[in-house]
Amino acid sequence: MLTVRDLTVGYNGVPIVHGVSLELVAGATACVVGPNGCGKSTLLKGLAGLIKPMGGTVELTGRGDITTMSTAERAAGGMGYVPQIDDVFKPLTVEENIVIGGYALPRKRVAINKERVLELFPRLRTMLKRHAGVLSGGERKMLAMARVLMLEPTVLLLDEPTAGLTEEMATRLLDEQLAELKASGIAVLLVEQRANLAMASADWAYVLASGRVRRSGSAAELRADPSFSHIFLGGTEETFTDNAADTTQNEGEVRCS
């Protein structure tokens, strides 16, 4: 669904993410984990078109090369993006947030898709008239995903969806909602600081350090690797980078298959 080759992105001419390649397939979830400041969110912003790439290409199934497309054009072409913060319109109601997500659709299609996302997130149906600003963190995140799903994306980018949530709410969000998204055939790329929790729900995992993919593989296998656990439970980015030569699987290249 998504093919990225040698993507380099950053700010003010300074690269943060260096030559990352990845492939996502339908009905699978891939997570990107790594130390704070390693470029995880920057990677998603580059894929969503919020940051102009310094190099590389981004291809979306059905639209071809979208490297130079705007964020709006990517959304219309099948890419959804949920940022870590400012992900809902707080002054609007839950229903208004959902409906505005279908801004590019015919009115009849908006009604159909509204019902579809409410089936996916049934809890939102009970709070349609509430203002988004009074929702809990978990409820706002569900609303943010529901709004993005109104345009029927084939690829969904999620940036730190469990930020600010309790462990229980975070687990429920990743276990239940990601499973629903996968079942619908959407390819999900998840950036998450809670590495073990994310990898428990993902099919594939990418480890990012210093803006480069240092290791990739089955999420279950990486999670069971003692050296990986040491990195995230007691190690540092420098420790991991120093050991990258021993653990790298096609450095700079990530595949989800």
Image (spheres, helix red, strand yellow):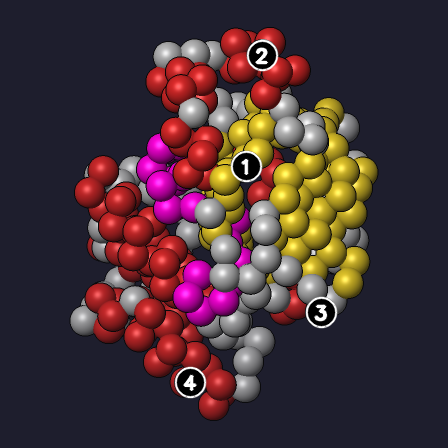
Determine whether, in the image, residue 63 is placed left or right of residue 219: right
Determine whether, in the image, residue 150 is placed left or right of residue 209: left
* Mark nearer the viewer, 3 or 2: 2
Across and down, in percent, residue 81 comes to 53, 54
Across and down, in percent, residue 112 comes to 42, 85
Q: Are marks 3 and 2 in contact (CB under 8 Å)?
A: no
Quarter of the figure with residue 129: bottom left
Magenta span of residues: 182-202
Magenta segment: does it hold 200? yes
Whether residue 239 is visible, yes or no, is: yes
Quarter of the figure with residue 38: top right
Dot 4 surroundings within 10 Å: few (below 14), some, or many (20 or more)?
few
Q: Amino acid at mark 4?
A: Ile
Q: Amino acid at mark 3?
A: Gly
Mark 3 residue element: loop
| Residue at 31% in and 75% down | 119
* Mark nearer the viewer, 4 or 3: 3
Q: Earlier in the sequence, mark 1 or mark 3?
A: 3
Q: Amino acid at mark 2?
A: Asn
Task: Residue at the far bottom: name it.
Answer: 108
- Which residue matches tag 2? 243
Numbered mark located on residue 13 in the image: none
Determine whether, in the image, residue 44 is placed left or right of residue 91: right
Mark 2 residue element: loop
